Image (cartoon, grey):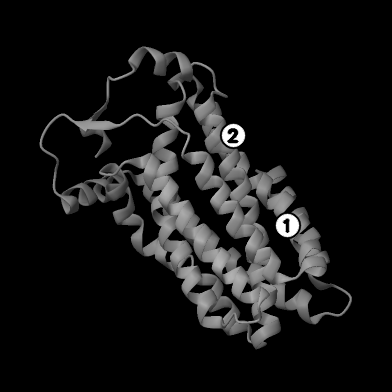
Amino acid sequence: MMSDSVETTAEPVSRKASTLRLWNRNFLLLWQGQFVSAIGDVVYEIALGFWILATTGSTGLMGTLMAASTIPRVVLAPFAGVVVDRTNRKWLLVLMDAVRGAVVVLVGLAAMTGRAEVWMVFVAGIIIGLCAAFFNPSVSSVIPDIVHRKRLVKANSFFSMIRAGSGILGNSLGGVLYSILGAPLMFLVNGISYLFSAGTEVFISVPLVHKERQPKKFFADMREGLSFVYQNRGLRFLMMATAVINFLASIALILMIPLFQRTEWLGPARYGVTMAVFTTAMIAGM
């Protein structure tokens, strides 16, 4: 695991100097890239839900397709951290964002030319989920290497704000944009946001990690991580509670789209406003 590694000593002095400030170049590039792509994700989910309902009229298919990006993350979660630990994290970030951007741009172009089909969106959702499974732990592991340890708590707080801020802003804009622009253009915007994020990540300097001793086997590393979670009683129950809450909340929230779609006086614009208010209330409650 990461405890078996040390950072490269190629630029120890300059790296320490650059990470004393929270908003150094590396942190700023990573943060703003993630914020833009996170807003794109929210906008994409709104457009995707309403587009599927308008195209197929099936709420069951809508739920299945929107879950396509979640299932790969769940399945690959135990493996992703080990892969990240053994990979050049900077280029893994760039690759995952570039792949997601290219796929979603192609879906957007297909939708704009009237050639988009449901199976294309399904495949895109799976690819997005696969990339996210490796991308998210990569970001978490990079943050401690681009900010000073005294700024780490504040840095993690700013990254937590991305989810909250993108939820409020993305939902507020998403419903209105769907009413004005339609789903195809919104798909394209999300793809471009991923490519923008990948472009900014190219200029991030992430220290390489060298192994002090012979690396463990892949599955041995994975078992070590799972064992740590299982043996920590508080962490184990926290993860279980989070999984149950997210599962039940997702069931309720996914049904909001067909409700607003099929109720004449509601519609996508009011859906976006409602979800933005919901997100704001949730943040205030926390």
Separation of disc 1 and disc 2 at Cα? 20 Å
The earlier-in-sequence mark between 1 and 2 is: 2
Q: State the image coordinates of residue 150 (x, y, percent, origin top left).
A: 47, 19
What amino acid type should be assigned to the residue bearing mark 2?
A: Phe
Left of 72 or right of it: where is 266?
Answer: right
For the view shown, which residue lies furthest in the bottom direction? 57
- Check disc 2: other Cα within 10 Å, few if <14, some if 14-19, many if 20+: few
| Quarter holding residue 252 | bottom right
- Check disc 1: other Cα within 10 Å, few if <14, some if 14-19, many if 20+: many
For the view shown, which residue lies furthest in the right direction? 265
Q: Name the residue located 53 percent from the left edge and 40 percent from the top edge.
A: 200
Instruction: Report the quarter where the N terminus lies.
Output: top left
The reply to whether residue 41 is in sight is no
Q: State the image coordinates of residue 241 (x, y, percent, origin top left).
A: 48, 55
Residue matched to label 1: 171
Q: State the image coordinates of residue 275 (x, y, percent, origin top left).
A: 74, 59
Q: Name the residue located 78 percent from the left edge and 74 percent from the top edge.
A: 260
Instruction: Compare residues 177 and 239 and report the one nearer the observer.
Output: 177
Q: Name the residue located 63 percent from the left edge and 86 percent from the top edge.
A: 58
What amino acid type should be assigned to the residue bearing mark 1?
A: Asn
Secondary structure, mark 1, is: helix
For the view shown, which residue lies furthest in the left direction? 214
Query: How many numbered marks, from 0 up?
Result: 2
Residue matched to label 2: 158
Q: State the image coordinates of residue 101 (x, y, percent, origin top left).
A: 53, 58
Q: Residue 135 carries which label?
A: none
